[in-house]
């Protein structure tokens, strides 16, 4: 939903933390959840680890908005579902959660949320289906994490983040319903 980006970003940055360069992380060096590869793409040139360590909050906000929030159509999703989709996109790329949402709402799974996906969401959500959608997405996300090679190393944190995101997403969804 529009106006939820900043609040959602704050919640995600809580999970992402600061600079990390874990030897088992296939993403390599990251700062506030932004990989060196992603930062290089944002800059339009190869970034250094030192530059990544000093990434500005303004750059972080632009990267998260353009690469993840906008790609899952956060402004167009209902409150709560927007955070749920945004967080998974940040953690795994935008296409995986988009395909899961498309599967749930019964439209073609192409990994790009467009008018048909949003229309199907709106139709289902008229029946107060948001909490159930968040639950289903959380289940699919957990199943995905458990299938990953590095689950033994990072799995506990991934599952904790997934559960915390589900709880916060449902809380936001219910608060959004009471505001209407």
Image: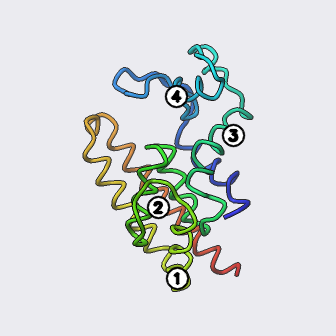
User: Helix, strand, or loop for circle 3?
Assistant: helix
Estimate how packed mark 2 is, as few (under 14), some (14 to 19) or many (20 or more) residues with alpha carbons within 10 Å.
many
Q: CA distance from mark 4 to mark 2?
A: 24 Å
Indicate left or right for 166 with 52 as reference: left
Dot 1 or dot 4: first in sequence order is 4
Q: CA distance from mark 1 to mark 2?
A: 16 Å
- Between 59 and 42, the one nearer to me in the picture: 42
Q: CA distance from mark 1 to mark 3?
A: 31 Å
Estimate how packed mark 4 is, as few (under 14), some (14 to 19) or many (20 or more) residues with alpha carbons within 10 Å.
some
Indicate left or right for 132 with 3 as reference: left
Q: CA distance from mark 1 to mark 4?
A: 37 Å
Estimate how packed mark 3 is, as few (under 14), some (14 to 19) or many (20 or more) residues with alpha carbons within 10 Å.
some
Q: Which residue is mark 1?
A: 128
Estimate how packed mark 1 is, as few (under 14), some (14 to 19) or many (20 or more) residues with alpha carbons within 10 Å.
some
Dot 3 or dot 4: first in sequence order is 4
Q: Which residue is mark 2?
A: 166
Q: Which residue is mark 3?
A: 61
- Between 18 and 78, the one nearer to me in the picture: 78
Dot 4 or dot 2: first in sequence order is 4
In the depicted structure, whether residue 48 falls above or below residue 102: above
Residue drawn 38% across the image and 27% down it: 25
Instruction: Select label 2 or label 3 by which is in front.
Output: 3
User: Helix, strand, or loop for circle 2?
Assistant: helix
Pinpoint residue 15: horizontal percent, then vertical percent: 52, 43
- The numbered dot on residue 35 is 4
Dot 1 or dot 2: first in sequence order is 1
Determine whether label 2 and label 3 are within 8 Å by CB. Answer: no
Residue drawn 60% across the image and 21% down it: 52
Indicate left or right for 117 with 132 as reference: right
């Amino acid at each position: 939903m529009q106006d939820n980006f900043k609040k959602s970003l704050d919640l995600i940055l809580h999970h992402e933390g600061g600079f990390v360069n874990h030897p088992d992380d296939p993403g390599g060096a990251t700062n506030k959840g932004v990989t060196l590869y992603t930062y290089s793409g944002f800059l339009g040139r190869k970034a250094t680890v030192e530059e990544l360590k000093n990434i500005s909050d303004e750059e972080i906000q632009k990267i998260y908005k353009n690469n993840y929030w906008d790609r899952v159509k956060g402004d167009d999703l209902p409150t709560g579902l927007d955070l749920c989709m945004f967080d998974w996109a940040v953690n795994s790329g935008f296409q995986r959660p988009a395909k899961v949402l498309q599967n749930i709402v019964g439209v073609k799974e192409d990994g790009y949320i467009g008018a048909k996906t949003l229309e199907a969401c709106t139709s289902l959500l008229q029946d107060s289906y948001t909490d159930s959608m968040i639950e289903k997405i959380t289940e699919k996300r957990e199943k995905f994490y458990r299938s990953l090679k590095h689950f033994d190393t990072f799995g506990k944190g991934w599952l904790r983040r997934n559960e915390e995101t589900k709880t916060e997403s449902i809380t936001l969804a219910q608060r959004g319903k009471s505001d209407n």
